[in-house]
Every structure is written in C-alpha cells, then in structure tokens.
C-alpha cells in the first residue's frame, strides 16, 4: 500500500478522500492536523503527539450491509494496539475506544457507495499518545501517556496501529474488547433516555439490550454511558 507522510495537514481523511480518483489503496499519516474532523460534524483536536492517519481502501463486491465490518476492524485494531502497550481498552459501541472511563481515540469512517456496495472507504483514526488535550476535554478524554505513565514514541504507536489495521480478520477481535456488556447503561434513543442492560452486538452492528426486561435491537441509537 502506498504511504504518504505529512508533517501537517488539515485532515488526513480529507487528504485521502481527495485522492479517491486515483483508484489505489493509500495510507495518509500526519503529525498534526489543523482541521481534524470528528463524527457528527464535530472537530477533533489534533495537536502534535498523537497518531492521526487515514486508510483508503478499495473493495470489489463489498455489500453495504457489511459496513459494520469496517468499523469493527478499526476499533479492534486500536484496542489491539493499546493492549500491546499494556493498557486495557474497552469499545463503547459502535466504535469509540475508552481507557479507564475516558475516550482515548476517535474513528471517522467515510464510505463511497456504488449501488448497494461500498466501492471504497476512508478509515480515519486519531489516537492520543502524549498530545496535550484542550481544557474542556480533560474530564472526558485521555492519552496513552496519562494512562500508562509511559511516553511511547508516536512512530511506535503508529506502526503498531497500521500493522493491526492491515491484519486480516482483525474484525473478529472486536467482540473481546466490547465494553459494558451485562452492565446497566443509559441509551439515548432520539431525544429519549432509557435505562438498559447491554447484551450483545450483532454482525450488522445492531445493539441488543434489555429494556424493562424486554430484549430490543437498536440500530442507530447512540449510547450514553455512566462510566464512572
Ligand atoms: C470522533 O471521535 O468524533 C472521530 C474522530 C476521528 C479523528 C480522525 S484523526 C485522523 C482522521 N482525520 C480526521 O480529520 N479525522 C480522523
């Protein structure tokens, strides 16, 4: 796979998306981003000291119905990286990664569809290594350094992450890192908050939870967790 290294760019996802027309798989890595993008139109703080990368992959006959596999692979790769570094990560469905109750990594996946298949995907990962976090995130976000006390080199974390992202069948490791199973959490369903016990996640990415003793499946609900 072709690799591009940048000291700084606005967003590695944007950089990779702009090169979709070339039709080749690509890995874009940056040391910092001036306009890092998060999910739901949010920004993603991307100061020096973190891993910021995007992996552009082209597929043949990849059904959109299997899109969750891409999310699973990204979250599992981040978890395997963190475990290798001695941490105990947990996935907050669908693909946020937490350590000790705080978010340590963000994943932004942007798929290009062709009919009912995914023609290509850009998997963007921002992993906090020892980067300084903005004041307003200190309560909810963390870094590898803050959790382990070890100042791993960005290059070391990055090469582990790339290794796991490229590992075949990495998605199979998603289940072992899924957090809060069997625990009571709060689900935000539309505007409504409901108490639920997490049961499982199916292969389509649906979340199964018990609400008032009834087993229900949630597709696009966003969970709000009481993590401390
Ligand atoms: C989120 O948690 O909201 C997702 C954040 C995703 C951040 C990564 S950093 C590398 C890539 N480039 C971006 O602009 N965003 C993703």
Image (cartoon, grey):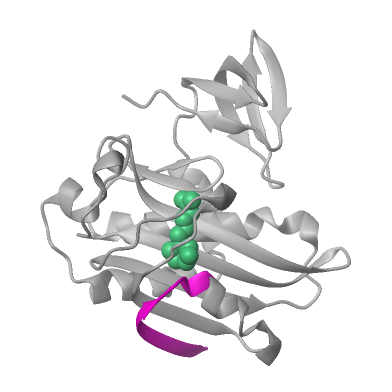
Q: Residue at x 46, y 54 (%)?
A: 43
Q: Report the side of 198 relative to 155 (left or right).
A: right
Q: Position of residue 114 (x, y in %)?
A: 84, 71
Q: Which residue is drawn at 40% across and 61% down?
A: 126
Start-end of magenta stretch? 1-13
Q: Is residue 7 magenta?
A: yes
Q: Is residue 132 visible?
A: yes
Q: Report the side of 7 relative to 214 (left or right).
A: left
Q: Which of 42 and 71 is in front in this view?
A: 42
Q: Report the side of 228 relative to 226 (left or right).
A: left
**Which corner quadrant holds the C terminus?**
top left
In the displayed structure, 63 sits above or below 143; it is below
Residue 44 placement: quadrant: bottom left
Q: Where is residue 34 in the image (x, y as percent from the top left)?
A: 38, 69
All told, the count of numbered labels is 0
Q: Which residue lies furthest to the right in this view?
A: 115
Q: Nearer the viewer, residue 46 or 149?
A: 46
Q: Report the side of 118 relative to 202 (left or right).
A: right
Q: Where is residue 40 in the image (x, y as percent from the top left)?
A: 58, 48
Residue 94 placement: quadrant: top right
In the displayed structure, 211 sits above or below 227; it is above
């Amino acid at each position: 796979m072709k690799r591009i290294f940048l000291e700084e760019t606005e967003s590695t996802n944007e950089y990779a998306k702009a090169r979709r027309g070339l039709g080749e798989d690509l890995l874009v890595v940056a040391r910092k981003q001036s306009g890092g993008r998060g999910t739901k139109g949010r920004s993603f703080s991307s100061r020096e000291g973190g891993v910021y990368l995007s992996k552009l992959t082209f597929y043949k006959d990849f059904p959109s119905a299997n899109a969750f596999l891409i999310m699973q692979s990204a979250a599992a790769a981040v978890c395997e990286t963190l475990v290798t570094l001695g941490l105990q990560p947990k996935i907050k469905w669908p693909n946020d990664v937490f350590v000790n109750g705080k978010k340590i990594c963000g994943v932004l996946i942007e798929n290009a569809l062709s009919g009912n298949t995914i023609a290509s995907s850009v998997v963007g990962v921002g992993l906090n290594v020892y980067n300084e976090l903005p004041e307003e995130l200190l309560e909810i976000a963390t870094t590898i350094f803050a959790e382990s006390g070890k100042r791993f080199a960005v290059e070391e974390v990055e090469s582990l992450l790339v290794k796991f992202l490229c590992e075949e069948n990495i998605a199979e490791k998603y289940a072992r890192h899924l957090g809060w199973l069997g625990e009571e959490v709060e689900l935000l369903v539309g505007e409504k908050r409901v108490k639920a016990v997490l049961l499982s996640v199916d292969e389509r990415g649906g979340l199964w939870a018990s609400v008032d003793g009834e087993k229900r499946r949630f597709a696009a609900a966003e969970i709000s967790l009481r993590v401390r």
